[in-house]
Image (cartoon, rainbow, N blue to C red):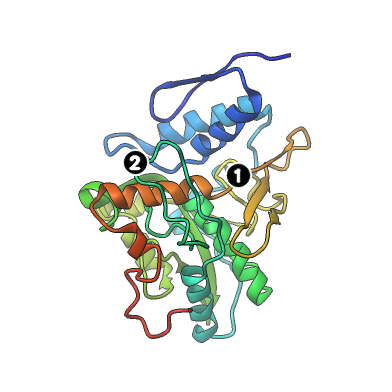
Amino acid sequence: MRYLICLWIASFSVYCSDDLESSSTYVRHELFSSARASDEDYKANLEMKRKLYEKFYEVESKGSAYDLSLPIEEADYSSVQELTSIEELHQMFLIARDTKFLQQATYDGLEVQPDPSIEPRRISWLYPHDGCYARAGMAAIYIDRNFSIRLSKVFVYGNLSAYSDYEEDHVATWNYHVALGARVEDKVYIIDPALNFDEAIPIEDWYELITYDSPEEISNLTVSVCDTNTYGPYQSCHHPFAPVVSGPPGMQTVEFMNNSDAKEDEEGVNIEGYLYREWDNLTLLGYNPNELLGDNPPWLDSSEAVK
């Protein structure tokens, strides 16, 4: 039986569809979106999306990454994976930043379509506006594949903001952010090339980067450290389902199972939407996406770039 689905989403518009499959894909992207209007309070945004998530999937989000977040001064980093050296950490960073393994994405609504010759694509590090959950998810998979190490996901919640040359008005604003965490000699580092092209950075520096507009906001942040397979803020923090990777190198997509509730179906959420948004955003900002997303990324002067 077909029926009409209507959801009030983060952009404060109503999305309606009588196609359950297509609406499900769209809604997943909206509910996991980290984007926040600069004058919007993060708690209201997250609570609205949490309720929609629970209603849409008919589950409770108890034990989720958001549900288990703690004030920053109480954050528990004991489960963060320990590495042998800074060198190992840096190799993971380079693999996540530089490797091209994703299928080129096109979309009928783009004024300038992505060049099919620029394939495969890197993770969408040049689209800080949204999609941190997809970037972290893909980076975790590729690091695990190359190093057989499952890095933790570090989720942060608050009225977040970060400077970027690849954001309109140069400031991205979020209600949450997530990236990969690793420990070296009892110090926690974050792999987040969207915010630092050069290297993994100490978690304290990361907190400063994501409170760019309001440094005093650091004391109000809440944090959760979750399993590598925790994809979005409303999924189980410690008992998520594993992703399913399909396709040959350069043509890969990833499907993630939703929360730990047995009533949920296996649903696909992949990074394709953020690849074409990355392309379109660079075009609108006056950059040449053929160059930046091809052989001339902004970190090209790094002698250690993975070829």
Question: To which residue does mark 2 refer?
Answer: 111
From the viewer's side, name the closer residue of 215 and 117. Answer: 117
From the viewer's side, name the closer residue of 234 and 110. Answer: 110
Toward the right, the furthest residue is 262
- x and y, in percent, of residue 16 in the image: 52, 18
Establish if 78 lies above or below 92.
Answer: above
For the residue marked with disc 2, what is the amino acid?
Answer: Glu
Q: Are marks 2 and 1 in contact (CB under 8 Å)?
A: no
Q: Which badge, 2 or 1, comes first in the chain's sequence?
A: 2
Secondary structure under badge 2? loop
- x and y, in percent, of residue 191 in the image: 47, 68
- x and y, in percent, of residue 34 in the image: 43, 43
Q: Count the numbered circles shown.
A: 2
Q: Would residue 2 be visible to someone looking at this image?
A: yes
Establish if 293 lies above or below 186.
Answer: above
Secondary structure under badge 1? loop
CA neighbours of label 2 inside 10 A, class few (<14), some (14 to 19), many (20+): few
Which quadrant of the view contains residue 77? Answer: bottom right
Q: Quadrant of the N terminus?
A: top right
From the viewer's side, name the closer residue of 106 and 222. Answer: 106
Question: To which residue does mark 1 refer?
Answer: 269
Question: Residue drawn at (49%, 45%), measured in percent from left and top?
Answer: 273
Q: CA distance from mark 2 to mark 1?
A: 25 Å
Q: Is residue 295 left or right of residue 7?
A: left
Establish if 119 lies above or below 188.
Answer: above
CA neighbours of label 1 inside 10 A, class few (<14), some (14 to 19), many (20+): many
Instruction: Judge depth for marks 2 and 1 and give the one in front.
Output: 2
Q: Is residue 150 left or right of residue 155?
A: right
For the residue marked with disc 1, what is the amino acid?
Answer: Val
Toward the left, the furthest residue is 169
From the viewer's side, name the closer residue of 24 and 285. Answer: 285
